[in-house]
Amino acid sequence: MQYEVVLPAAGSGKRMGAGQNKLFLLLANKPILIHTLEVFQHDENCSGIWLAVKPEEREYIQHLLDKYSITKVKGLPDGGEERQHSVHSCIKEMEQVDIVLVHDAARPFITHDIIAKLTYTAKEKGAAIAGVRAKDTMKKVKDGIIIETVDRDSLWMIQTPQAFRFDIIAEAEDVAEKVGFLGTDEAMLVERLGHTVHIVEASYENLKMTTKEDLVLGEAILRKRES
Ligand code: C5P
């Protein structure tokens, strides 16, 4: 199933505390951003990559794309204040395609297998997102007090990629911008228009590189995959 992917890469990574865009940090001697891009560069079903970037980082990112022979990038539009704005700036520049995948550039361990399940489900049903089952006991807390123990069986931790038919995500992004709705993922924008969103069971390895501890885990995942 052919698709194009939107990779928001214009964050500041404050929680990483690296003093630079965390996507430029190295994992096994290669920038996190390149690990993610290589997954899509080497996926025969990916027909284009859209990367939202900070204007002041565009030149360096272009240098990385050339250095690592990432040739599928179709555009490097300006990112926005929030991640959702960065995604929207890519979608506004895209031509009509069948399926759009939105994936955090900070999740370098995504696999072709999960991408394929998402794109097939989105093609058939409209919208599909990656997630994993909650592992811990889940409680709702307010002011340091337990309000409720939530039934864990119905709880999933949501990741990216999130895959959509183009018309669905394009409309949802436009409406969200018009009414000033800010979601924490793309599925929220699609859900509020009444679309059904399907879950695809992904992997606990599909980490988002967020804090320094994630870098240690990331190195371990790469070592395991190479052995
Ligand atoms: O900060 P966090 O890791 O949750 O961001 C997820 C992804 O969204 C990262 O790849 C980051 O670069 C990107 N992002 C963006 N524009 C923003 C904020 C985050 O493209 N304004």
Image (cartoon, rainbow, N blue to C red):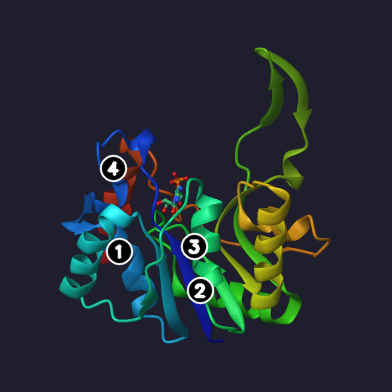
State which mark lies toward you, 1 or 3: 3
Q: Residue at x 30, y 33 (%)?
A: 17
Q: Amino acid at mark 1?
A: His
In the displayed structure, 123 sits above or below 57; it is: below
Disc 1 marks which residue? 35
- Residue furthest to the right: 194
Residue where numbered disc 2 is placed: 93
Q: Amino acid at mark 3?
A: His
Whole-angstrom CA distance, mark 1 to mark 4, is 15 Å
For marks 2 and 3, give the CA distance: 17 Å
Q: Nearer the viewer, residue 16 or 146?
A: 16
The reply to whether residue 99 is visible in this rendering is: yes
Q: Mark 4 or mark 2, which is nearer the start of the sequence?
A: 2
Element marked by disc 4? helix
Front residue (pair 4, 122): 4
Q: Which residue is mark 3?
A: 103
- Residue 73 percent location from the top left of the image: 35, 77
Mark 3 element type: loop
Disc 1 secondary structure class: helix
Sooner in the amino-acid sequence: mark 1 or mark 4: 1
The amino acid type found where label 4 is placed reads Val
